[in-house]
Amino acid sequence: MKILVLLGGTSFERDVSLASGEAIVDALKKAGHEVIPVDTAKGKKLLSSSTQFLPEGVKQKPPDVKSLQRIRKELTLKTIESFDLKEADVIFLALHGAPGEDGTIQALLDMTGKPYTGSGMLGSALAMNKAMAKKIFEYEGILTPKWLLLESSNLTDIAEIEDEIEKKLGFPCVVKPNDQGSTVGFSLVEEMKDLKEAFEKVKKFTGQILIEEYISGRELTVGILDDKPLPVIEIIPEHGIYDYECKYTKGKSGYICPAKLSKEKTEEIQKIGLKAFKALGCQDYGRVDFRYSEDEKFLCLEVNSLPGMTVTSLVPKAAKAIGIEFPELVDRIVNLALKKKK
């Protein structure tokens, strides 16, 4: 097939998307497809088989705001309009963050009638909006850490906010953007005195701040492929928390797949992961992240509708554990997109 791969984009996860896109393009070629890679921020076709989209790899921090603002002057919509989508049999979304993972691109592609990989507009939007996802989790009886949502423009009375956090969540707590992935803008706040610094950090990335109860315990994730849970992975980050640096810097995290859980607990977390995935209306493939508390409860953090897809990313690791190599995995995802369209 002729496959258009959309990658890069203008989100704070641009570098991660370029890394995913590079791996996906290579795997699709190995699976025998004709591939057209397109950076949605620049409209640049990256056709050379030897081209590295991100030669230096993912850096320890996300791209800075100013560099992304320069890129955003070239509109994603115009970029997509400049290509004849009729030539492509299917569109593979290697985008992360917004726009790309938040339902925006999905809504546009729905209007073209062209099949694309991953979840649709609604599932993508709900998964990206962490507060909305948590409301659905709570309605569905899926445990999730306690949380508060604040507008970054309404942080004038810090004393009142501090009091509310202490009463409802306690310390330590987690401060992060409500609408970003890859722990962009994330802070683990150990004491009240550190809140102001965390707020200043997160305001650079979002208009909505999610404050979440910190759950002491193990970091686990469940990949989903074709409505079936993949083997559970335990993540052991160097920093104790799976932040941006630990995610994308080689050697900063260890991974155990399958995770060391009893058969009963493995089945339990897989069942919850699939339930969370479906509750948001997600489709085809994704990843559901958990904390496993010290009192042996699984608390769902979020659903990733377009998870990282480098060869060393978590969903490919889980797929490989059951004998699905990376080229076969991306080929399956393409066929799920076509099946969904039919």
Image: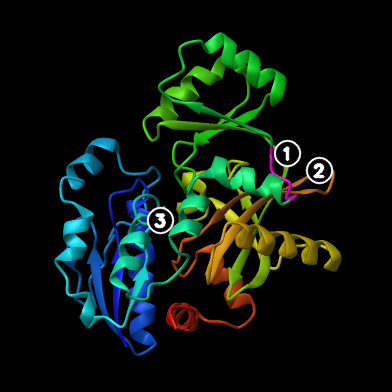
Amino acid of disc 1: Ser
Look at 22% across and 80% down and name the residue there. 86
Q: Main secondary structure of the magenta part?
A: loop
The answer to whether 20 is drawn above or below residue 341 in the figure is above
Question: Above or below — where is 65 with respect to 324?
Answer: above
First reached walking from the N terminus: tag 3 or tag 1: 3
Q: Residue 266, percent across and down? A: 78, 65
Q: Amino acid at mark 3?
A: Gly
Secondary structure state at the residue bearing disc 1: loop
Crowdedness near tag 1: few (<14), some (14–19) or many (≥20) residues, C-alpha within 10 Å: some
Q: Amino acid at mark 2?
A: Glu
Give the residue number, with chain letter if any, for mark 3: 103
Query: What number of labels is visible?
Result: 3
Q: Which disc, if any, is residue 294?
A: 2
Earlier sequence position, callout 3 versus callout 2: 3
Identify the residue at image location x=79%, y=62%. Answer: 268
Front residue (pair 325, 132): 132
Compared with residue 280, is residue 32 higher up or lower down, i.e. above or below?
Answer: below
Marks 3 and 2, how far apart at CA? 35 Å
Q: Counting residues from the N terminus, which is met first, the one under dot 2 or under dot 1?
A: 1
Name the front one of labels 3 and 2: 3
User: On the picture, is 65 further left or further right than 135?
Assistant: left
Residue tagged 1: 216
- The nearer-to-camera label among 3 and 1 is 3
Q: Tell me, yes or no, if residue 60 can be seen here.
A: yes
Q: Are marks 2 and 1 in contact (CB under 8 Å)?
A: yes
Mark number displayed over residue 244:
none
Residue 121's quadrant in the figure?
Answer: bottom left
Residue range in magenta is 141-145
